Image (tube, rainbow, N blue to C red):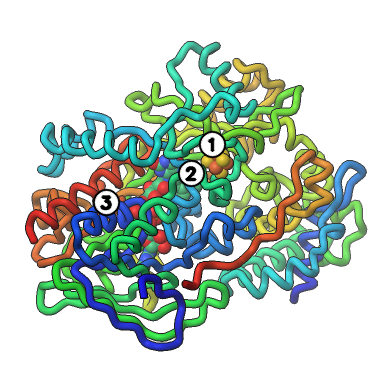
Amino acid sequence: MTWLVRSAMCALYPRTEGLPGLEDCDVDGFLERFQRESPLLMWVGVLAGALVFHLTPVFTVFVPLPAFLLPVSLLDRHSSRIASSDWYLVRQAIFLVKFPCGLCWGEHPEVRRRLALAAYPQDPGTWRVD
Amino acid sequence: MPHVSFRERRFEGDVDYVVVGSGAGGAAAAVVLARAGAKVALVEAGAWREPEQYPSSAYGAMRDLMDDWGATVTMGRALWPVVQARTMGGTTVVNSAIAIRTPADIFTQWEREHGVGGEGLRDQVWAEQAVLERELCVEEVPVGSRGRSNELAMKGAEAMGFESHWIRRYAKGCEGTGQCLQGCRKRKKQSTNVVWVPEVMERGGLVLSCAPVSRVVLEGRRAVGVEGRFQHPATRELGASFLVRATKGVVVAASVTHSPVLLMRSGVKNRALGQFFRAHPGTGVFGVYDEPVDQNVGATQGWASTHYRETPGLKLETLSVPLELVASRFAGGGVELMKRLGQYRHVAMWCHAVRAESTGTIGHAPFSSKPVVRYTLNADDMERFRQGMYLLGQMHFAAGARAIIPGIAGLPFQLEAKDVELLRNGPTDPRKYIAILSHLFGGCVMGADPTRSVVDGEGRVHGYEGLVVADASVIPTNLGVNPQHTIMALARLFANAMLARA
Ligand SMILES: Cc1cc2nc3c(=O)[nH]c(=O)nc-3n(C[C@H](O)[C@H](O)[C@H](O)COP(=O)(O)OP(=O)(O)OC[C@H]3O[C@@H](n4cnc5c(N)ncnc54)[C@H](O)[C@@H]3O)c2cc1C
Ligand code: SF4
């Protein structure tokens, strides 16, 4: 199922001339970490959001195919329209996918360099034990 | 053994007072008790991280500092995040440390509506706040740490002709790294894990971290301790159980969402428990400027205005938002979204917090201690909300913005000055807005009437002995200003009252 999430994420944050896309941001490593570290319910929500993303092109670009089978230009139109859907619950479902996208994309050193932001040091992930 | 963290062997301890939660309320109460010579145990659900161990990324902040990854949302018309921390120091670790004295009208309102408060309490709270301001080094954001977003906001307010100010915060020599949300790695912010928790330990206290309390132990109607099981901060696996017995009293300060749930699950009976939840829901408007703003440079929050606190009921502030969160907040997807994100350096986020009158409830999920917050803004509050958006939009244009990004579903992504009236007539459906709740009140409200309140004017749970609540959950109304200064002052007063009774 992770590939479903991955492809929805990469479609929502594609590579452009100006900025790297999620596919340039070690999204596989990120997803492995996110799945392991986030609460199960959050991961289930992201999966559900990705499913909504893939099953709705018929409503946005009027093509009865899952999003992962769409040609690039239609996929981009679908990404744009589904993320701004008039239906609140659909918008929320897509937000669940955009949330990890933002975390992965915004912390990547290359993205940060392009936007004149300092790279983050490694998060220590440690705590006081004594 | 002054600090006990996650462990596989059962732990038992005996103290005079046990305090649950190390945030604004809990740590303030604990240090007062410890300074009086009492043996205190401070029991915190989250891990204890030194500033050098704080994360830098938003991912790390969600994972290491936030309660449930910030995933608690209101169950109501709209699903708005209810943001709180779960770490030693509580929400003081991730907040902006803004310190504002409790407005005088609040005490009058508490007295009129809840039978507690009045001028007597006002004078006591203000006296405590004066002490806190010295102890926590309250100072205005230094000139060199303001950053462009804060300076532009001052310019916008001046151009519109309303009163505003540089924020005063519990931060000593803020360097303007814009990282308050991820914890101050520079040790400038005086969060309770940095100032008071070590002091409790130095004074002979016991600190338990990674130790979510599952139950206040009651003998009849007397609180005699707390128990729970350690939880590993990374894997979330449960460790051994713990029991801390307290001879003189139990202080619950686990936050607005967790304190009512803890009392419910401990078997405390009170009809008002979990009722009268209130908040200051807030959202922001981005301004787009020709010159780079670099909102990440400068104090996370450096400018504010209380000018509209009474009418229509708004607080305005700046807020620098990490790129990661802007990336998911900007509307849209695909190439269009990436183009929007290319403007990051040029955007400034200013926000409002609504002094909302709507009330909700706190409960918990079946067989779980996970809080469930039921809350929807009523029509009057949505009107305030909309007016706040309009004000922020106007302010950006007054400060020279070329466009604004209001983030309202159904409106264009970006608006120009000629379109700002669209905000005045914007939607009143909460679903159209992306808001968050970070200032929370109620759930264990104080009052004189035991049928309408959970605690009395000294934080004592009605009908129980040795059980005090000392956090934001006792606050029976909204405040219209940032709450931490009020919470700390009340907690200190409640702790002093406990000492006086002992
Ligand atoms: C992003 C953000 C910015 C803010 N900025 C400001 C600001 O600048 N100024 C201001 O005045 N206010 C601000 N606030 C609000 C302010 O931080 C809170 O109102 C305040 O910290 C609440 O204090 P509290 O003691 O009620 O709860 P908290 O400070 O949240 O502390 C509660 C503690 O209890 C612990 N806990 C919960 N359950 C258990 C359990 N079962 N067992 C043991 N421990 C438990 C939690 O882990 C937590 O550490 C902000 C809030 C947020 C989210
Ligand atoms: S802006 Fe930076 S230096 Fe200033 S208090 Fe916040 S985290 Fe600390």
Image coordinates for residue B482, horizontal then vertical, percent: 38, 38
Dot 3 and dot 2 within a common chain = yes
The answer to which of A41 and A110 lies nearer the viewer is: A110
B78 lies left or right of B288: left
The CA span between labels 1 and 2 is 7 Å
Residue kind at label 3, given as amino acid type: Phe
Determine whether the beta carbon of the residue marked 2 sits less than 8 angstroms from the nearest atom of ligand 2.
yes
Determine whether the beta carbon of the residue marked 1 sits less than 8 angstroms from the nearest atom of ligand 2.
yes
Residue drawn at x 81%, y 57% is A22
Image coordinates for residue B232, horizontal then vertical, percent: 50, 77
Is residue B111 placed above or below A92 in the rendered structure? above
Q: Of label 3 and label 2, which has the lower sequence position? A: 2
Q: Which residue is mark 3?
A: B276
B8 lies left or right of B186: left
Residue drawn at x 78%, y 69% is A29
Q: Which residue is mark 2?
A: B189
Residue drawn at x 60%, y 55% is A92
* Residue B130 in which image quadrant: top left
* Residue B60 in which image quadrant: bottom right
Q: Which residue is mark 1?
A: B174
The CA span between labels 1 and 3 is 36 Å
Residue B292 shows up from this direction: yes
Q: Please tell me whether mark 1 sits on a helix, a strand or a loop.
A: loop
Quarter of the image that includes the C terminus of chain B: bottom left
